[in-house]
Amino acid sequence: MNLPEEAAARGPFWRRGGRLHVESVPLEAIAARHGTPCYVYSRAALESRFREFTAALAGRDHLLCYAMKANSNLAVLDVFARLGAGFDIVSGGELARALAAGADPRRIVFSGVGKSEAEMRAALAAGIGCFNVESAAELERLDRVAGAAGKRAPVSLRVNPDVDAKTHPYISTGLKENKFGIAHGEALGLYREAARRPNLELVGIDCHIGSQITEVAPYLEAVDRILALHDRLVAEGIALAHLDFGGGFGIRYRDEAPPPIAAFVAGILDRVGDRPVKLMFEPGRWLVGNAGILLTRVEYLKRGADRDFAIVDAAMNDLMRPALYDAWHDIVPVAPRDGPVRRYEVVGPVCESGDFLGHARELALAEGDLLAVLSAGAYGMSMSSNYNTRPRAAEVLVDGETVHLARERETVPMLYALERRLPG
Ligand code: LLP
């Protein structure tokens, strides 16, 4: 079925008669069928973001490696794999997930500062496209592990360009004080060393300066530094097949106004010019953040001495971002309600004062109402926990009028199934 007019105009999340829908499905129907809390993703939103990015790169050899840490549900990975995406992984677990979702191993890049030998072996056996190496010690280890496996490991060095991404300090990664990457000044020497190692094959340069970047300028500063290194390497006879500029493209949560992806890409293409390299990116949040919401129900309304609380059934264990980064997520009613608007602290049932989803939100509410926490598609479910022995939420992927249960709600016995009481 074609999406109705309103949906086409407003995107995958829209209202009809005040009732919030995802594609063709009312969120109330999803809550009734699958319960709350529940993550709800839109396939159309995922696909349109991916296509927007690839369209900006049209005519240029490129590969988008979705940073699956943002949302690693198999159904989400499957959507991207079918579109020809690669994947940026950071663990053996993510490797297994990507392969289980049908990823082409040659389109997988492996990032992260702490790759174990076992993870290296698994990635070599799978035949991944590139290891993004983050230190001299890792380079040495990878050479040894590849040699023992009788393979040559494809390698990029992740270079830390030392630029300020101007984002939250916890998610900034490209400054020299960060643990990530190889200092810009040391990169050339390490490339020379890597070129001499028998079991490594140099294929690219990688960088990633941080997340939720809402300005083009710092991104391009990093690009300039990577290009300078690239040119130097070429002059020394070290030719590289690709340049990977990482992810980090910001999205709108509240009033941020990140430039369109085409603006980032245009600036990058301009600088790269006719250098004969494949361009790679590792976007996470930009692809999935606004393609998902967290659906939750109001359990109680509580009048406090100073403040009113809306106690909902989702909590910091489901969505950590507010508690961890003081991140702002819009919280909107799923159905209209007449009645007085009050200012609520929207909080969960977890026993921590940091357990909130939003402060001072103006809402007209009654117990039992459904709320949607917006922009929850990235770093929501993937960072969730079982704190307070709370089963993790269900996840559904909506595709037109079809609701696909992408992950069942956990049950409590699952949570202690691996634990053992003392003997006797
Ligand atoms: N590549 C590398 C090497 C990364 O470390 C990351 C994210 C990405 C790509 C994807 O970045 P994105 O395009 O999603 O910005 N939990 C935080 C975000 C942490 C990002 C970690 N690295 C949050 O909820 O804001």
Image: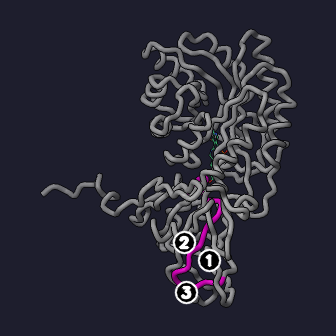
Kindly report which numbered mark, 3 or 1, lies closer to the viewer in this rendering. 1
Disc 2 Cβ-to-ligand 1 distance below 8 Å: no
The answer to which quarter of the image holds residue 321 is: bottom right
Q: Secondary structure at mark 1?
A: loop
User: Is 122 located above or below residue 386 in the figure?
Assistant: above
- Closer to the camera in the image, 13 or 371: 13
Q: Tell me the amino acid under the disc marked 2.
A: Glu
- Which quarter of the rendered picture does the N terminus lie within? bottom right
- Mark 2, other Cα within 10 Å: few <14 / some 14–19 / many ≥20: some
Q: Secondary structure at mark 3?
A: strand
Marks 2 and 3, how far apart at CA: 24 Å
- Mark 3, other Cα within 10 Å: few <14 / some 14–19 / many ≥20: some
User: Is 148 located above or below residue 169 in the figure?
Assistant: above
Residue assigned mark 1: 335
- Determine whether label 1 and label 2 are within 8 Å by CB: yes
Q: Tell me the amino acid under the disc marked 1.
A: Ala
Marks 1 and 2, how far apart at CA: 8 Å
In the drawing, what numbered circle is on residue 302?
A: 3
Say which label, 3 or 1, has the lower sequence index: 3
Q: Identify which residue is drawn at 72% across, 40% down.
A: 209
Kindly report which numbered mark, 2 or 3, lies closer to the viewer in this rendering. 2
Q: Identify which residue is drawn at 50% across, 48% down.
A: 73
Say which label, 2 or 3, has the lower sequence index: 2
- Closer to the camera in the image, 5 or 255: 5
Q: Identify which residue is drawn at 57% across, 54% down.
A: 399
Q: Is residue 373 magenta?
A: yes
Residue 141 pos. (x, y %): 50, 22
Residues rendered magenta in the picture: 364-380
Q: Tell me the amino acid under the disc marked 3.
A: Lys
Ligand 1 picture quarter: top right
Which of the colour schemes (rainbow, by chain, secondary structure, one colour) is used? Answer: one colour
Residue assigned mark 2: 28
